[in-house]
Amino acid sequence: MFNTFLYQPLFQALLFLTKIFSNSFALGIIALTVIIRILLIPLTLPSLKSAQKLASLKPELDKLKAKHGSDKKKLQLAQLELYRQHGINPAAGCLPNIIQLVILIALYRVFIDFINQNTNDVNLHFLWLNLSQPDPYFIFPIIAGLSQLVLSLMLSPAIEHHPEKTPAKTEDVQEMAQTMQQQMLFIMPIMTAVLALGFPSGLTLYWVITTLFSLIQQYFISGWGGLAKYFAKIPFSLKR
């Protein structure tokens, strides 16, 4: 099933696109990435809109945490009711992310097999890179990590909310939760960069292009999102 519905279609599509672009492996990868992301729009668009709504509810979620922080069951029920009132499904973003992860795994195998079978016919070079090998200068892994960081910051709440004064114990819990959220912003970018160090540069190129596509999508949905507060600290404004 994996071969029939995922591996073979991706392999044949990459082969076709590479031949169209004069046997350029890089252009074949870029074209395949754009096509994949366009096909995923019906899944990713509702997910991004749901994430935007969820971020806008942060002040209300903070109030619920302050009110029910010591009772996890009541807090969960109150959160679910809040999501229901605003038509939000917290799990909406899971399916697109799972699909993209499965595609990434399939593409790793596709790229390896494609390179092994077409070494003499295909131009594997792009800029300073041999797309069949990891980037020797670590530039593309760094770009992949930074682009993922920008996306994470865009998806974070745009407005910092300071809840009303609460008991010390609740404040400690909230502070710990906020610290964990801040740490999570950097975990995915760091993991992306570290994994890309060992990936063939062709796979890293795919990841960079697909992240840039996500950045563009997110911008047209919610503007700069969480990045706006960082732009406010510099002399010029990039607010949408």
Image (spheres, rainbow, N blue to C red):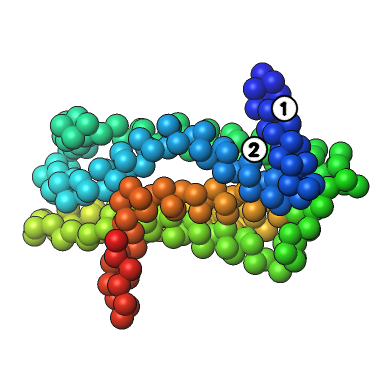
Circles 1 and 2 in contact, beta carbons < 8 Å = no
Q: Which mark is residue 105?
A: 2
| Residue located 86% across and 39% down the image | 117
Residue under label 1: 8
Residue 7 x %, y %: 70, 29
69 versus 162 height, above or below? above
Earlier along the polypeptide chain: callout 1 or callout 2?
1
Residue 152 x %, y %: 41, 55
Q: Amino acid at mark 2?
A: Ile
213 versus 168 height, above or below? above
Q: Quadrant of residue 81?
A: top left
Residue 108 x %, y %: 70, 41
Q: Is residue 111 visible to us here?
A: no
| Residue located 78% across and 48% down the image | 22
Question: Is the C terminus in the top left, top right, bottom left or bottom right quadrant?
Answer: bottom left
Outermost right residue: 120
Q: Relative to 181, is 151 on the left or the right?
A: right
Considering the numbered disc 1 on the image, is that residue within a helix, a strand or a loop? helix
Q: Quadrant of residue 140?
A: bottom right
The one nearer the camera, 200 or 67, is: 200
155 versus 87 height, above or below? below
Q: Is residue 33 visible to us here?
A: yes
Q: Relative to 63, is 29 on the left or the right?
A: right
